[in-house]
Amino acid sequence: MILDADKVSAQRYSGHGSALAQVYNHLIMPLADRRDALTQIRWGIADFQHRFGRKPEGMWLSETAVNRTVLDLLAQEGIKFTLLAPSQCARVRLLASNQQPATNNEQPWIETPNATVDPTHPYLVRLDEGRSIAVFFYDGPASRAVAFEGLLNSGVDFANRLLNVFHPPSPGDPETAQLSHIATDGESYGHHHKHGEMALSYAIHTIEEGEQANLTNYAEFLEKFPPKWEAEVAEDTSWSCPHGVERWRSNCGCNGGKPGWSQEWRAPLRQALDYLRDASAPLAEQLAQHFLKDLWPAREDYIHVILDRSPASIVKFFDNHAARTLSELERITVLELMELERHTQLMYTSCGWFFDEISGIETVQIIAYAGRVLQLARKLFGEPGLALEANFLNILATAKSNVPEMGDGSEVYRRYINSMQIGLEQVGAHYAISSIFRNYPEHGELFCFDVHREGQETFSSGRGRVAVGRALIYSRITEEAEDICFAVLHLGDQNLSAAVKRYNAQEPAQVEAFNHFTTDIGTAIRRANLPEVIRLIDRFFGDMSYSLTSLFADEQHRILNTILNQTISEMEDSLRKIYEDHASLLHFLTETGMAAPPALASAARFAINAALRRAIEADSFDPDAIETLLQRAEADQVSLDTQLLGYTAGQRMKRAMVRLEASAAGDPSAAGALTMALLIAETIHKMPFEVNLWQAQNIWNDLLRRSDTNYWATEWKEDFKKLGKAMNISVDQIVIEEGVSAF
C-alpha cells in the first residue's frame, strides 16, 4: 500500500512522490565518521530506489540530527531537501535576488532563537563548493499537539489547527505561498492515539473539500516555490535532545525520569563501539586486499546484496569487486567480511542510547550487533581479531549499569550476547529440535538458512520419542555450509535433550558408525530402554548439550505454546467434566441464593469461558451453541473473561472478512463467505461485552471502495449492507464520491 500511495502521489503532485528516503539504519549522523555517514546515505538511497523504483528527492535524518557537514554530504549525493525541527534553525536572511528593492548587498542575518523560525516556507542552506540544499522546518507546536496534547481527538480540530498556521504576508517577505506541515511518528495514528488515523483521514478530507488550502508534498512545493530565504542550521542538534546530540554520547539529563538512575554508561558505550570500528577497519583492509579491488566501494555496493540475496545478485557483486576469480572458501571469506562491515553500521542504531539503562532491550540489541562484529573478527583476523574482544570489554566494563546484579556493560555482554552468537551447528540443533514438533520439507528454509534433510527416522515408546537424522545447513548470507547428524530425545512436555555434530558422508567409517547408531537406537526405544537410549547418544555424540532453551526465541515460544495448549486442553477437559457432572447442583445453588463452593465456581468459570472461546473460534460457527453458553453463564452467575472473549471474537470476525475478500477476488473455495460473515457479525453484535471490530470494519470499507457497485447482484449488496450495520458501521452515511451514496 505504501508503494501504491507513492505512485498515486506522484500522479497527483506534478510527478513528485511523497515518500522520503532515510539514512539506512537510524544512526546519529553528526556522530558518525565521514565514511560511515556516506555509507548510510548511499545505502539509504539504494534501499529507496530498490523499493520505490525512483531516486529520492528528500531524506529524513534520524532524530533530525544534523550539522553542516551532514547536509553537505546529502547534497553531494543528490538529495534536494530534508526536514528539521524549528529549534535547529540558527538564523535566516533573504536571498540577495529576492531583496526589495533589488541590491547586490547581502541582507543581515536574523537570529531565530527559541524555535522562532517561520515554518511556512523552505530555506536554502549554502554548502561547500557551490552546493546547497533546501530545508523545511516543521511546525513544532502543531507536531507536539498531535503527539502529546490530544489533537487527534477531533478531526475537525486537527484540520483547523493545520489551517490556522497560515498568516498574512509579512512586510518585505517575498514569499507568495505558505506551507503548513508537521512531523510526527506514524504510531500516533491509531497506536498511541486510538482512532488517530480516522482523525487524520477526516482532517485531510476537510481540507481537501474546503477552499483555504491545497494538498501538496515537499518536492512539489519546492519545485513550484523555490526558497527565497536562506538559513544556517545550529550545529550538532536534533529534535529529541535539547542538548544537541548529547543523548547519544553522554549523561546529558535526557532520560525516562527514573529516580536515582544515571546515564553515564552512554559515553563508554560509544567509546567501545568507536574503538571496535576503528580497530577493525585496518584489519578488514589488510584482509580485503587479497580478494577485493577496494574494500570501501565494495562495502557501499554490498547494499544490493543485502536487498537481493539471490545467486545472480551475489555473482554480480563479485564480478564488480573481486580482484580475481575467487574460490568457494574465498567467497565465503569476503561475504563474512561484508557482514562484519554491515554490523559495524547496525551497532550504531540510535535507540541503543535513547533510553535509561544499558541492559535495556534496545541497548542489548546494538551490543549484539557489536558481538557479531567480534564473532566474525575472531574467525577472519585470527589473533588480532581475538584481541579486539578483550579491549572492547575492558571499555564496556566502565559503562556502569543502574541494575545492581548487572554490574556493567561487560556483564551485559557476557550474560546476553555470548548466547546469541551461533554457528551452523546451533542452527542444526534448532532444526533437529523443532523437527520433533513440525514437519519440515526435504528442502526448506530456516530464517536465513537453507536446510536439506538427508535422512531422518523417528522412534516412539509411550510418551518418549527419539528423532535421528542428517541434514545439510547452508547460510544464504555467507554461503557457508555444513553437514550435520543429530539425535533428539523427547520425554514429554519440556523434557527434551538433543545432540549435534559434524558429519561427513564421504567418510565410510562415519557413515557405518551412524547407521549402526541408528539401528541400536531403534532397538533400545522399541524395548522402552530409555537409559540405554541416553547411553547410546552420549557415546556417539559425547553429550546432549542442547535443549528447548537452545531454540531461536520465536520457535521456542511456538513450541512452548504447543506444549501448553495440549496441557491446557487436558485441563479444560477435566474441568469441563467436573462442571457438567455438577451443573444441575450449581444451578440449584444459584436459584436458592446460596454461593457455590469456590472449587465448583472456578470449574464452571473455566469450563464455560473455554467452551465459549472454542465455539467462537470454530470454523463451523454455531450461533445457537454460543447463545446457549451465554445463557448458562448468566443463569449460573458465571463471570466471563470479557477481555479474552472480546479479542477472540474480533479475530474471528477478521478471519471471516479475510475470507470474504478472497470470495470477492473469485476464490471458489470461499463460497458462502458473505453469509458466514453476516452470521458471525450478527452473533457478535448480541454479545454482552465489547468487541473491537476495527480490523474487520477496515476490510469491509476497503471492499466497498474497491468494488464496482454495478457488478454485485442486488442480494449481495443487501447482505453486504446488513454486514456493515451488524459491525456498527453507519452505512447509510457513507459516500464513495461526492454526492453519491454507497447504497
Image (cartoon, rainbow, N blue to C red):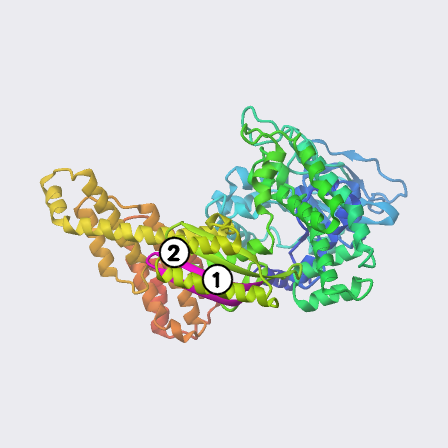
Q: Is residue 460 above or below residue 266?
A: below
Instruction: Name the disc covering residue 517, or none.
Output: 1
- Residue 413 is left or right of residue 281, and the answer is left
Q: Is residue 23 visible?
A: no
- State the residue in front, 678 or 199: 678
Q: Is residue 263 above or below residue 705?
A: above
Mark 1 or mark 2, whichever is nearer to me: 1
| Image quarter in which the N terminus is found | bottom right
Instruction: Name the disc covering residue 272, or none.
Output: none
Q: Amino acid at mark 1?
A: Phe
Q: What secondary structure is marked by label 1? A: helix
Q: How far is mark 1 from mark 2, CA to CA?
A: 48 Å
| Image quarter in which the C terminus is found | bottom left
Question: Which residue in the structure is indicated by mark 2?
Answer: 651
- State the residue in front, 432 or 585: 432
Mark found first going from the N terminus, 1 or 2:
1
Check the image and name the residue furthest to the top.
260
Q: Is residue 41 visible?
A: yes
